[in-house]
Image (tube, grey):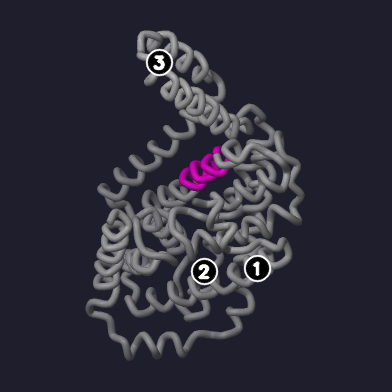
Amino acid sequence: MKSFIKNLFLIIITALFLYLIFVNIDFKQLLVTIKNFDMIYLVILPISIITSLAFRGLCFKLLISKSVNIPLKISVPLCLTGAALNIFLPARAGDIFRAIYTGNKFNADKIKILGTVMLERVFDGIVILSFLLVGIFIYNKNPLAQKLSLLSSLIFLGALVFAFLAVRYNKINNLCSFIEQKSSFLPEKIKHPFYSFLHFTNKTCNSFIDGFEVLKYPKTLFLSVLSFFAIWMFECLNFYIVIQGFHCTVNWSVTLFIISFIALACMIPSTSIFIGPYQYAVISAFNIYHLPKETALAVSLVEQTVVMITTAIIALIFFLRNNIKYKDFSKNIQ
């Protein structure tokens, strides 16, 4: 029943976005726009996509380098595979897959690796919101947008500060020991399962926080941050290449809004492959520059399609080379 309600909710959200996307759209003009796309850019685009995800592999290698020595020849295709799974499966399944695969391959703590992956998301948020702030404060000085972007930035910066404090002053053991002492009055039937749960929570939380250990190493952290900026600059380049393919005379700033809007929109629950929020984010970014809705939709459809095909092919190769079966993978995720 819960699954049915969840799926119904996702369908409703997606349907709402699809309505906003296709209302007042000129389908004839949309087809003409797509038809006029310069196909030579389809050769360049996959290279840019793979490069951005290769930097993701470098980031992943750097962030877990103090506990796992994962070579680039594994981390890069692993991150490309994770990106594909994030597109086609819900609940960031690709991120969970990366933690499970790395843990199994290198005999490492999976919860710790997952903590590192979550730290990635914090850095992603900080970088893309810095792009949004640059775009808003330089190119579109809307007071409401400035306040919302600043608030979002503070949330991600707050998460980073929390991670620093968690690594520097980890008090999980002390807290769990205190709770255990104060709960000694409980009856034995309740005490035993409660203590088991408490010990499990203690171990899990400590493993998760251990995933933030890169924050203790300034040089590695600095290199990781540079890699994150490289990732998102290439993400901007992906859209810039597609925009040029449609012969739009726009400057680089439009891609800052596109990337920022997409990253925020993809946090909205929706069905697989981000249908709805993804396209609406691009349309919203184009609207700032008063560019045609049909062009924006065409850009989003071409870019997303190439990303899906490129990452899906690499993910398939990765699964086949490593003899990974979807059934086993799905069971591990669950």
**Where is the N terminus found, in terms of image quarters?**
bottom left
Q: Amino acid at mark 1?
A: Ile
What residue did someone put label 3 on?
188
Specify few, some or many for label 3: CA neighbours under 10 Å numbering under 14, 14-19, or 20 or more. few
Determine whether label 3 and label 2 are within 8 Å by CB: no
Q: Position of residue 190 (x, y in %)?
A: 37, 20
Residue occupied by mark 2: 240
First reached walking from the N terminus: tag 3 or tag 1 = 3
Residue at (39% x, 89% y) in the render: 31
Pointer 2: residues within 10 angstroms few (<14), some, or many (20+)?
many
The majority secondary structure of the magenta stretch comes to: helix
* Mark 3 element type: helix
The amino acid marked with disc number 3 is Glu
Mark 2 or 1 closer to N-term? 2
Q: Quick one: label 1, few (<14), some, or many (20+) residues within 10 Å? A: some
Q: Is residue 204 magenta?
A: no
**Label 3, label 2: how many angstroms apart (C-alpha)?**
65 Å
**193 above or below 144?**
above
- Which of the 4 image quadrants contains residue 113? top right
Give the SS element for disc 2: helix
- The residue at which mark 1 appears reads as 314
Instruction: Write down the region rendered in magenta.
Output: 115-126
- Name the residue type under label 2: Tyr
Q: Residue at x 48, y 71 (%)?
A: 304
